[in-house]
Image: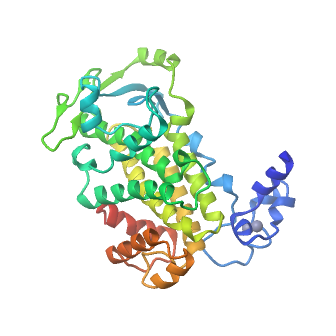
Amino acid sequence: MQKDSLLANASCLRCTLLNLNCSRIAADADESEGECSQCSGFDGDLPCTTEEELTEDFEQAFSGVIELENGVWILTEPTGESKKIKVDLSSFTADEVQHHAVVDYRPLPDDDEDTSYDRFLAQFEDLSSRWTLLYGDETFYIISKAAVFQRYMYTCGGPIRYDRTRSPLFLALRCLVVSHDIMEIRLQTEPRAQIRSHIHGREAGIERHGGVVPQIGMWLGDNVASDFSESRKPSSDTLCYLLQEIFASAQKSLLTGNPRLWPLVLYTLMMLIVARYQLKRGEGFTDTFLGPHCAVHEALERLADLFLYCCGDMHPLTDAFDPEWFDLCVGGEQMLINDYEEFHELCVVETTNGIELLDELDVHILGLG
Ligand SMILES: [Zn+2]
Ligand SMILES: [Zn+2]
């Protein structure tokens, strides 16, 4: 059994999708560097790679980032200097946090699972009155639609095989919340040259639009090293792990060849674009997120290439998108069709490869051009 599953994983993406015998399976590690015999001569944007290769460099990329608990980070710069940063909500009451902040999914002992799940997703409905206003209406709108879509996939018998809290979209929403700390720190810390060991930023409080301003604590110097021995976040809640899981399950969803999963992957791509942007904002105060940003950037392009390889013209950002064909593909599932028609009206460009698709989503989700 063990051997079978290892062999199955060695097949390249294209052979997996087309159900072909992949010559990578027979090759040893050295030989599998090149293209498999099915891919050689294939002229397109899908390189001959295996599932595992998409996120294989993530752990190395995140080696300078340690999460002790939600909002508490130890960042070790390439120069070896470490700092501990805390995005502190402790001055707010539980009620204030629930109504004015966004917190990561964490089932509480007293709640049933439905309550925790609902409470997490509900935060995205009024996101613009929770997060400091760093995004435009379009961004908030698309994130809220993604949360609605996640709910839909599990209440209307969507074609999902995994648990709802393991769906790539649910994990991508969690990833947005965790990486949003980087935005808060960036917003409230002084330029890096002036950083000292003390409390930064504006005083904690609730802004007029509703969002909380957390207090940012930052500690530098030798004593930070001792914090490495503090207990860390469970590895299954870290940003690195969430991203690995998101990419792996989005890729798996595409490899099923089921068109009803394409919208789920498109929403996941959109949330990953926002997460990538948040990682990029780290450059204002640290170099530790450069590696993660690069790794996510590359994996996103490869996932977008696979997405386009799977769905061809059957995605809403292309002129050639035909709603009637898509309707047939997804068995008349109205929610999927409505969302695709709406996106088709929002933005239509010629996208021939993953990079172009992502650039276009960047423009429409984040207003970056
Ligand atoms: Zn192959
Ligand atoms: Zn191949």
Color style of the picture: rainbow
Q: Position of residue 57 (x, y in %)?
A: 60, 46
Residue 207 lies, with reference to residue 138, above or below; the image says above
- For residue 142, side relative to residue 296 (left or right): left
Quarter holding the C terminus is: bottom left
Which of these two is toward me, 90 or 221?
90
Residue 350 lies, with reference to residue 215, above or below; the image says below
Q: Which image quadrant is residue 159 in?
A: bottom right
Task: Give the residue drawn at x 25%, y 40%.
Answer: 187
Task: Give the residue drawn at x 47%, y 26%.
Answer: 109
Total count of labels:
0
Q: Position of residue 164 (x, y in %)?
A: 53, 48
Task: Give the residue drawn at x 12%, y 41%.
Answer: 208
Quick check: which quadrant has ligand 1?
bottom right
Q: Which image quadrant is residue 27 in?
A: bottom right
Which of these two is toward me, 174 or 118?
118
- Residue 245 appears in the figure: yes
- Residue 214 appears in the figure: no
Q: Which image quadrant is residue 146 in?
A: bottom left
Q: Position of residue 77 (x, y in %)?
A: 45, 33
Residue 243 lies, with reference to residue 268, above or below; the image says above
Task: Give the residue drawn at x 49%, y 45%.
Answer: 292
Q: Position of residue 78 (x, y in %)?
A: 48, 35
